[in-house]
Amino acid sequence: MALIPCQVLRVAILLSYCSILCNYKAIEMPSHQTYGGSWKFLTFIDLVIQAVFFGICVLTDLSSLLTRGSGNQEQERQLKKLISLRDWMLAVLAFPVGIFVVAVFWIIYAYDREMIYPKLLDNFIPGWLNHGMHTTVLPFILIEMRTSHHAYPSRSSGLAAICTFSVGYILWVCWVHHVTGMWVYPFLEHFGPGARIIFFGSTTILMNFLYLLGEVLNSYIWDTQRSNEPPF
């Protein structure tokens, strides 16, 4: 895909996330007024992650256009830092958290929607917004991975980072329960203490697996593309 269409695509995706966030925040739901607000939901945190990530992508594209041919070493150094931040964020947050939200939401929804997304929410959240939060994340992040090569960090540092995020969110969910007496997600009410520990441990393992999946997928896409390029 040519450079300019990629830039336009990233701007469009960024604007779509901004629209989704604005529409979501405009909804007056009881859960938004309780302790932690929207920030206790991984879906909302993921939307912020995706919006910030694609914002960095757009900023990187603009910086690249402005830096090209300038010969300014300081600008090139700053651009390399921006690219490194973009790549790190895709590897550690945007891909694993985004895919996790889509996969876990729809699996639980298919089993029993009342456990994750009660029918009552249909009165507050329109269908298109639900898909914007829980479906389009997947194609958007795959498009980005396909159109731009991303350099992954070392496996140990990447896994350490996603583990830190996962454990941090689990502790946040437990703290919200400690303060309010209510679990963020209804299905956790049906679990005993031991089952919750197993569930939280399993989600952390899944996050690590998704990080590795992203690393493998990124390498496969770009190694295959390089092998298909005609030799000079």
Image: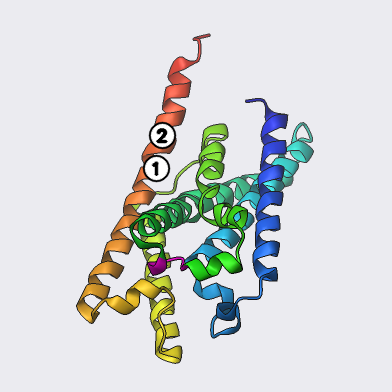
Residue 133, horizontal then vertical, whole percent? 56, 56
Question: Does 31 appear above or below 65?
Answer: below
Residue 53, horizontal then vertical, whole percent? 60, 53
SS state under label 1: helix
Give the numbered dot on residue 219: 2
Q: Residues within 10 Å of mark 1 (few under 14, many from 20)?
A: many
Q: Assign the N terminus to one quadrant of the image.
A: top right
Q: Residues within 10 Å of mark 2 (few under 14, many from 20)?
A: some
Q: How is the image coloured?
A: rainbow
Question: Does 201 appear above or below 54?
Answer: below
Question: Does 1 appear above or below 196?
Answer: above
Residue ID at (33%, 58%): 111
Residue ID at (70%, 69%): 26
Residue contact at pointers 2 and 1, CB within 8 angstroms: yes
Residue linked to disc 1:
215
Q: Nearer the viewer, residue 150 or 108?
A: 108
The amino acid at mark 2 is Ser
Horizontal arrangement in the rendering, residue 199 relative to residue 101 (left or right): left
Q: Which segment is the magenta one?
A: 114-118
